[in-house]
Image (cartoon, rainbow, N blue to C red):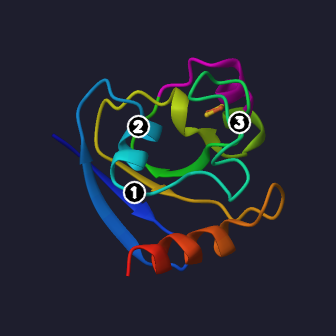
Amino acid sequence: MLEITVYLIDGSKQKITGKAGQTLRQVLLENDITPYTKMTTQLNCGGRGVCATCGVWIISGQAKSTHWHDRLADKYSYPRLSCQINLEEDLTVRLPHKWIWGSREAHQMKRAKKNE
Ligand code: FES
């Protein structure tokens, strides 16, 4: 099992586990952590690497860039697509703030209230 540390928007962190070969997006969603905003939860490409709505910042650990978007992300320093990261080792990631396609903060607050 690989350990993924996720820094959430509120600054808290959550440790989750995944298997080598799983995508980071898959592991996040399995653990009820969304890389999406309110709108992109419904309007995303399902992990095909097309919509660019599943970004995360890599804080530590290696995640090879095989997708054209991620090669540009490495070069120009913007978030990586979680659906294109195949887990190979422990990672630490941070969810970015988002203000378009429905804010992430409002969406996460609703998810938290739903789980109460
Ligand atoms: S889910 Fe669409 S690019 Fe990742």
Q: Is residue 85 above or below residue 25?
A: above
Which residues fall within the magenta stretch? 64-72
Residue tagged 2: 26
Where residue 68 sits, quadrant-wise, is top right
Residue 32: which numbered mark, if any? 1
Q: Secondary structure at mark 3?
A: helix
The mark nearer the N terminus, 3 or 2, is: 2
Specify the quarter for ligand 1: top right
Q: Is residue 82 left or right of residue 14?
A: right
The residue lying at 65 percent from left, 73 percent from top is 105
Q: Does the magenta-highlighted stretch encompass residue 96?
A: no
Q: Secondary structure at mark 2?
A: helix
Report the mark closest to the observer, 1 or 3.
1
Residue tagged 3: 73
Viewport quadrant of the N terminus: top left
Mark 2 and ligand 1: say if the CB distance to the nearest ligand atom is below 8 Å: no
The residue lying at 53 percent from left, 32 percent from top is 83
Q: CA distance from mark 3 to mark 2?
A: 20 Å
Q: Amino acid at mark 3?
A: Ala
Where residue 74 sits, quadrant-wise, is top right
Q: Secondary structure at mark 1?
A: loop
Mark 1 and ligand 1: say if the CB distance to the nearest ligand atom is below 8 Å: no
**Crowd class of label 1 (few under 14; some 14 to 19; many from 20; radius 10 Å):** few
